[in-house]
């Protein structure tokens, strides 16, 4: 039954986000169509992350992200005109909120949270990169934000670079978040303030020890060191086809 409850929570989180993304596409007001598209994409991407964290890892962060989505969708509902799709979205928000109040929810693959949680500073950095664009758009109704999609995609690219551990993953957020912050000067003043503050916080978090340890292991991978055969254990030598005198064994004809 526990598995069904958490699967229901994950399904409602995803369906609710899909509904409100559709509502923003059909009727973007009070936002412009471009800003509404950024908010809708943010809902879908965040829902996918939250559902993955809930179903696979039983991560408390996944449930908190789901709660954040419910709150964001409720705010959207408060600003959008009432339509049939609006009513469907509000009903889904209520259902998702009711299911997420269950404190016994676990995961499908893992019932308990991971034993080694991600450092708080690294997690906060990821959340800032994920949410800065949609939140900036959400807080800027009726504003024309032609540069917001590009800035949001840039932040998401840095996020993927960081979490996928691509080459330069440690330096990527340190070097790019200040540049993204400067890019925020292209936005109107209210959106500019939100975006720049978010990128400054992300830049500070990128330099913390927790963010570094999240992508660099405590024990680095070792390197082979050659040793004389006489110092190697006999079973290792025999498995390598070498006799006790360090000579290669000849294969029988």
Image: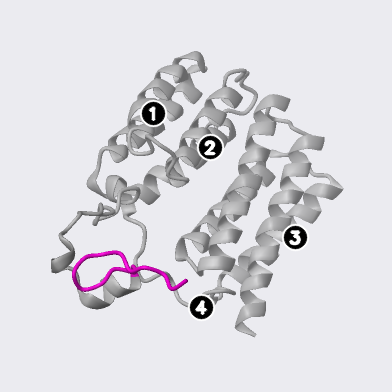
Q: Nearer the viewer, mark 4 or mark 3?
A: 4
Reading the chain from its start, which is encountered first: label 4 or label 3?
3
| Gap between marks 4 and 3 measured at Cα | 29 Å
Quadrant in the rendering for residue 31: top right
Q: Which mark is residue 177?
A: 1
Magenta range: 240-253
Q: Quadrant of the N terminus?
A: bottom right
Residue 153 colored in magenta in the image: no
| Gap between marks 1 and 2 measured at Cα | 17 Å
Q: Which mark is residue 13?
A: none
Q: How many marks?
A: 4
Residue 249 colored in magenta in the image: yes
Residue under the image location 54 percent in, 33 percent down: 133
Q: Which mark is residue 111?
A: 4
**Main SS of residues in magenta:** loop
Q: Which mark is residue 91?
A: 3
Reading the chain from its start, which is encountered first: label 3 or label 2?
3
| Gap between marks 4 and 2 measured at Cα | 32 Å
Helix, strand or loop for disc 4? loop
Q: Which residue is mark 2?
A: 135
Q: Is residue 127 above or below residue 250?
A: above
Residue under the image location 73 percent in, 31 percent down: 29
């Amino acid at each position: 039954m526990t598995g069904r409850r958490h699967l229901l929570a994950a399904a409602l989180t995803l369906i609710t986000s899909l509904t409100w993304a559709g509502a923003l596409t059909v009727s973007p007001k009070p936002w412009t169509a471009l800003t509404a598209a950024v908010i809708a994409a943010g809902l879908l991407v965040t829902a996918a992350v939250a559902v993955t964290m809930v179903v696979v890892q039983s991560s408390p962060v996944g449930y908190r992200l789901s709660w954040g989505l419910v709150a964001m969708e409720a705010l959207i509902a408060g600003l959008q005109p009432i339509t049939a799709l609006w009513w469907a979205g509000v009903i889904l928000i209520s259902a998702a909120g009711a299911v997420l109040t269950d404190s016994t929810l676990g995961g499908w693959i893992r019932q308990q949270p991971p034993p080694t949680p991600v450092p708080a500073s690294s997690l906060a950095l990821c959340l800032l990169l994920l949410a800065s664009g949609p939140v900036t758009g959400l807080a800027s109704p009726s504003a024309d934000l032609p540069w917001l999609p590009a800035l949001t995609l840039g932040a998401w690219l840095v996020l993927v670079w960081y979490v996928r551990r691509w080459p330069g993953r440690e330096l990527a957020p340190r070097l790019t978040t200040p540049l993204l912050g400067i890019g925020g000067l292209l936005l109107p003043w209210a959106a500019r303030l939100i975006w720049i503050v978010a990128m400054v916080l992300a830049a500070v978090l990128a330099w913390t020890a927790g963010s570094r340890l999240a992508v660099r292991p405590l024990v680095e991978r070792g390197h082979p060191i050659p040793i004389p055969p006489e110092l190697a254990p006999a079973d290792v030598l025999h498995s390598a086809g070498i006799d006790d005198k360090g000579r290669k064994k000849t294969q029988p004809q």
